[in-house]
Image: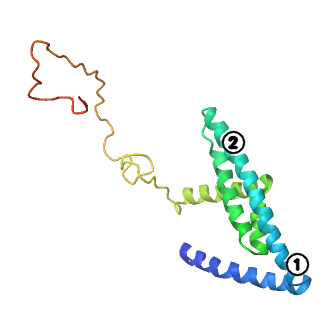
Amino acid sequence: MTLLGRLALLFVLVPLLELALLVRLGQWVGFWPTIGLVLFTGVTGAWLARLEGLRALWRVRTELARGRIPAQAALDGVSILVGGAFLLTPGIVTDLAGFGLLFPPTRRWVQERVRRRLVEGIERGTIRMTVVGAPPWSAGSDFAGFGSGAADIVDAVVVDVVDPSNPEPPDRVLDADRSD
């Protein structure tokens, strides 16, 4: 099944499952307690997502201030954002998934599983990485490694010599980047 087919199935089956579980819960505990639970998980989830999101933002800033790439903190931020979106979506399954992404131990467990699946997919060749906006000869491009790669590298210093006796500019300007 293609990725689009899986997503379509997911977007149809998950809401149906959530609706069936909410109806079943409503029959078991009553209508108003079910509505209260949905509202409670939404408010609590938003509060927890804000708290964890600010903590992740602080870690990103700290890592950047130390001159490090904040990869784990940024991944935590994305996980918290997805978890918060799950918690704002009414339903039991999405609430469980959302709370799971907000708590650090389960968040790390999920991140490790996703990372492992991505690495396996890249190694098998079923997942390809493309760098958007990069020049065609850079890493991640289909054209990376094209050609000999032995281009001449010129290191030069430009010296602008002005003859004070001749105020006229030269006929030919060699430095196109000059702003004067």
Q: Is residue 46 left or right of residue 156?
A: right
Which residue is pictured at 70% across the width and 54% down the height?
112
Q: Tell me if residue 60 comes above or below residue 40 in the rendering.
A: above
Under circle 2, the secondary element is helix
Mark 2 or mark 1, which is nearer the start of the sequence? 1
Amino acid type, residue under disc 1 in the picture: Pro
Amino acid type, residue under disc 2 in the picture: Arg
Under circle 1, the secondary element is helix
Which residue is pictured at 19% across the width and 16% down the height?
161
> Relative to the observer, which residue lies in front, 39 or 10?
39
Question: Is disc 1 surrounded by few (<14), some (14 to 19) or many (20+) residues within 10 Å?
Answer: few
Which residue is pictured at 50% across the width and 58% down the height?
128
Q: Tell me if residue 154 comes above or below residue 54 in the rendering.
A: above
Q: Is residue 134 left or right of residue 7?
A: left
Q: Is residue 51 left or right of residue 72?
A: right
Quadrant where the C terminus is found in the figure: top left
Which residue is pictured at 70% across the width and 56% down the height?
80
Residue 138 drawn at (x, y percent): 40, 46
Which residue reaches farthest front? 167
Query: Which residue bears the numbered disc 2?
Result: 59
Q: Of circles 1 and 2, which is in front? A: 1
Residue 97 drawn at (x, y percent): 75, 66
